[in-house]
Image (cartoon, helix red, strand yellow):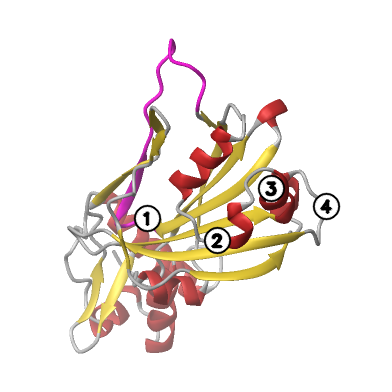
Amino acid sequence: MGEIQRPGALYQQVAAEIRSGITAGEYKPGAPLPSESQLIDRYQVSRPTVRKAIAALRAEGLIEVIHGKGSYVRAVPAPAVTIKRTITRSGKTFHTGHQAWHEVEAPAVYRTTTTATTGPLLGLPEGEALFAVDRLLSDPRTETRALHRVLIPFATAASEAEQLGEAPDTEPEQIYALLAAAGHKLIWDETVSARMPLPDERATLQIPDATPIVHATRVTLGTDQRPLILEELRAGADRTQLAYRLTADSPRTLRTV
């Protein structure tokens, strides 16, 4: 492959050629890319152009740069941890898929308000008062990390489960039990998306550069399908996958969108 002649900025042309090589299997996962000098000779471009192309591919998550060694095609291992998102109930006790995870530090409890994103999910206008509880969790087997957040409207704490006003950091499974004891037949709406992490999320979750996260948003609904609490779970997409068990003849307890 010689001098490139594609439209677009020169570094984008080089990046496109390398990307094609990765897709075609010319460069295998975990294998090194040619050196800068080799890429310069191969594509007849300058060193800054090659470096910009490598930076673009790194931002896409296709390659990783190891200081002192060079650029490598990023391996795509199978996720190390499966987080079971199905909620089960035994008598008055509820169970979720990350109960066995350890808390890395004490939960952070604070007051906040609904935003343009969380307000509609909770059926509330923007600016309504909430309790927020942030937990940093770690899988005991792999030390994979996850961020878990619970948002509790003041109205839920005041009228549905007074204990939540005094102890917002009650475990989610116990919150479900309190809401069920208050007479609610609970169902859950959950959506899952993927996005690039914010800098603080990347640092806290200890995930590599240019690695997306999975972001699960779960709303607990009570009587008349009224939103009661909102939960968010964030984890590195390179280390985790989410699993659900749904059966056609079981009572409707979890809805995924």
Question: Badge 4 is on which residue?
Answer: 125
Question: Badge 2 is on which residue?
Answer: 167
Write down the region rendered in magenta.
Answer: 236-253
Q: Earlier in the sequence, mark 3 or mark 2?
A: 3
Which image quarter is the C terminus in?
Answer: top right
Distance from Cα at disc 4 to Cα at disc 1: 32 Å
Label 2 CA crowd tier, 10 Å (few <14, some 14–19, many 20+)? few
**Amino acid at dot 3:** Thr
Label 4 CA crowd tier, 10 Å (few <14, some 14–19, many 20+)? some
Q: Is residue 237 magenta?
A: yes
Front residue of this view, candidates 36 and 141: 141
Give the residue drawn at x 27%, y 50%.
24
In the figure, is residue 51 to the left or right of 228? left
Question: Badge 1 is on which residue?
Answer: 237
**Amino acid at dot 1:** Ala
Label 3 CA crowd tier, 10 Å (few <14, some 14–19, many 20+)? some
Which labelled disc corresponds to residue 156? 3
Q: Are marks 3 and 2 in contact (CB under 8 Å)?
A: no
SS class, disc 3: helix
Please identify, in this view, whether the residue under mark 1 or under mark 3 is nearer the observer: 3
Quadrant position of residue 224: top right
